[in-house]
């Protein structure tokens, strides 16, 4: 089955995502609106109106350091704040979703506390949200991560599913977490009821490594045909986050396989 309505895109440079997206043959783009390792409110994007008017699908990735699951007030409270700020800014460029990692608690913490902190995050959002869906992404490592293993993901979704968050399936992260990729779409949908976006990445490392290191399809440890099958079964937009020097090749490979 060809994914005629789903978009195949790439994570691109935030300075001029439309130009970069066109250069790599992307139908959709994902980028940061601010420093991915910073706590500052994202500045208005200088090309916001062009991005909003574009025919490309647009996804925004929240900063990596957001961790609303944390039991540390100095991390959790600022995380909620910048999650709100980036979601609002994402809506301002017409994004289809804001991607955010599931986060974690420390080894001494009860993971259920992290789950409840996620629930409180949604409870405290304004009615109607921020104008853009929050898309929670599975992660590669961390023993007390909220969305690394699918059994933990199930506990998270029991707490937040009623608030309607979306889900992003990252193939490299699932592989690194030791999850079996064959049949992964069916297993995820049994937990979340949905997959809104696939991060179609290969991995530099072997399965179960816990390492979040993406690789090009030609050199990675995940069979590229398996990545194609996952995208086909998910039936949603795809963003590729492999190294920039070869990402155009991966976009072309996936587009040829799915069209």
Image (tube, helix red, strand yellow):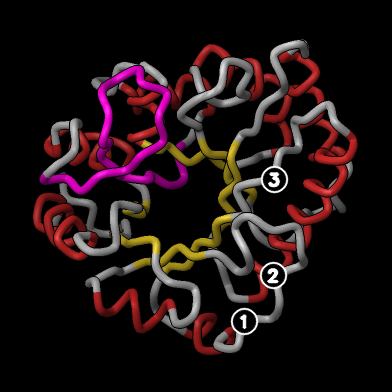
Q: Which residue is mark 2?
A: 89
Question: What is the magenta range?
Answer: 195-218
State left or right for residue 19 relative to residue 59: left
Label 1–label 2 contact, CB within 8 A? yes
Q: Which residue is mark 3?
A: 66
The CA span between labels 1 and 2 is 9 Å
* Residue 12 image point, x, y percent: 39, 67
* Mark 3 surroundings: few (<14), some (14-19) or many (≥20) residues within 10 A: many
State left or right for residue 9 relative to residue 132: left
* Mark 2 surroundings: few (<14), some (14-19) or many (≥20) residues within 10 A: many
Q: Which residue is mark 1?
A: 45
Name the foreground residue: 25 vs 63. 63
Residue 151 to residue 41: above or below: above
Report the mark closest to the observer, 3 or 2: 3
Magenta stretch containing residue 215, yes or no? yes
**Residue, x 24% and y 71% (percent of image)?**
24
Quadrant including the C terminus: bottom left
- Circle 2 SS class: helix
Label located before the other in sequence (1 or 3): 1
Residue 237 to residue 49: above or below: above
């Amino acid at each position: 089955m060809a994914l005629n309505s789903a978009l195949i895109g790439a994570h691109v440079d935030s300075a001029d995502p439309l130009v970069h997206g066109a250069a790599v043959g992307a139908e959709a783009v994902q980028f940061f609106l601010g420093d991915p390792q910073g706590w500052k409110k994202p500045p208005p994007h200088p090309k916001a109106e062009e991005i909003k008017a574009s025919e490309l699908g647009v996804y925004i990735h929240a900063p990596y350091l957001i961790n609303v699951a944390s039991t540390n007030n100095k991390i959790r409270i600022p995380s909620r704040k910048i999650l709100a700020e980036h979601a609002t800014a994402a809506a301002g460029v017409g994004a289809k979703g804001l991607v955010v990692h599931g986060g974690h608690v420390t080894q001494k913490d009860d993971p259920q506390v992290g789950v409840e902190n996620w629930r409180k995050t949604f409870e405290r959002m304004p009615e109607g949200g921020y104008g853009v869906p929050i898309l929670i992404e599975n992660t590669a490592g961390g023993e007390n991560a909220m969305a690394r293993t699918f059994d933990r993901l199930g506990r998270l979704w029991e707490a937040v599913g009623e608030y309607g968050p979306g889900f992003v399936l990252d193939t490299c992260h699932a592989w690194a977490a030791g999850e079996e990729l064959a049949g992964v779409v069916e297993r995820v949908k049994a937990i979340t009821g949905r997959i809104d976006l696939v991060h179609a990445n290969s991995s530099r490392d072997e399965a179960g490594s816990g390492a979040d290191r993406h690789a090009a399809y030609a050199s990675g440890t995940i069979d590229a045909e398996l990545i194609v099958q996952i995208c086909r079964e998910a039936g949603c937009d795809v963003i590729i986050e492999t190294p920039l020097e070869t990402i155009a090749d991966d976009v072309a490979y996936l587009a040829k396989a799915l069209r």
